[in-house]
Amino acid sequence: MTRNASTTPPPAMPAADPSAPSAPSPQAIKASQRKLLLILACFGIPLLLAIVWLQVLRASDGTIGDTSRGQLVQPPLPFEEFALQDADGQPWGLAELRGLWTFLYLPEGECAEVCEKNLYHMRQVRLALNQRMDRLQRVVLTESPNQLGDELVAQHPGLQVLGGDDEMRAGFVDQVRSAEGAMGDEGPFGGIYLVDPNGNLMLRFDADLDPRLMLKDVKHLLKISRIG
């Protein structure tokens, strides 16, 4: 008869300390990684776009891409507060430049062939933007209430026709003139300006520029812009 060997029970496992932190689950680790990537993207992408945009400007010698024909205002002119009036006599100032891209035109004297052509180009370029046309407004600063005439204004729905007394207008024109002077061009107005949604005068298109080239510049800006 064989005697059963005595067995020693295994040592008891120490009880888990309820206060000790538990290891994060794989799902929690993945969630944390996604949050970190999102934070990096929020801060890194705008910086990357700014660096790329700067490189584009440097490579194109101040133009916007290889199709640009707009003359870059260097340095861009941040408009100071001004006081003009719209066609209904309502105040129109710096706040109305905020949040939208703006075509700005300042005709001198009678609105004849060149003036009418510029108004037409502004209208057609905006229409050609299709679903993005609402990001661009058109503004004309007149020298007198009848400079354009009712018939011409009627051909351009949505055109903001601005005016004001001599002092109001002169203050605004002086700001544009200062930008012209910084560019080494103090000749008469004759082109179309582009103002960004932060109220900076940044581009000028010559009066005889093919509007298809103007459209390419504007499309490019709207495509890469995170504002307006």
Image (spheres, rainbow, N blue to C red):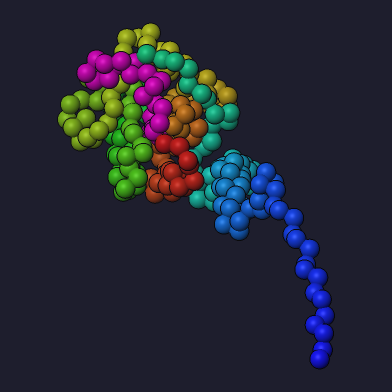
Residue 12: which quarter of the image? Answer: bottom right
Quarter where residue 132 is shown: top left
In the rendered image, residue 215, in percent from the top left (x then y), is placed at: 40, 46
* Total numbered badges shown on the rendered structure: 0
The answer to whether one can see residue 160 in this image is yes
Residue 219 versus residue 166: which sits nearer the camera?
219
Range covered by the magenta-colored residues: 84-104
Q: Pick whichever, 137 or 4, lies toward us.
A: 4
Residue 118 seen in the figure: no
The residue lying at 36 percent from left, 39 percent from top is 135
User: Which quarter of the rendering shows the C terminus?
Assistant: top left
Looking at the image, which is closer to me, 139 or 223?
223
Image quadrant occupied by the N terminus:
bottom right
Q: Position of residue 43 (x, y in %)?
A: 59, 41
User: Furthest residue to the front?
Assistant: 1
- For residue 121, side relative to residue 10 (left or right): left
Q: Is 174 on the left or on the right of 110, as rendered? A: right
Identity of the residue drawn at 18% across and 32% down: 154
Q: Please determine whether, in this image, residue 102 is positioned above or below residue 212.
A: above
- Residue 220 lies left or right of residue 44; in this view the side is left
Q: Is residue 92 magenta?
A: yes
User: In the figure, 160 relative to 136: above or below?
Assistant: above
Q: Is residue 128 magenta?
A: no
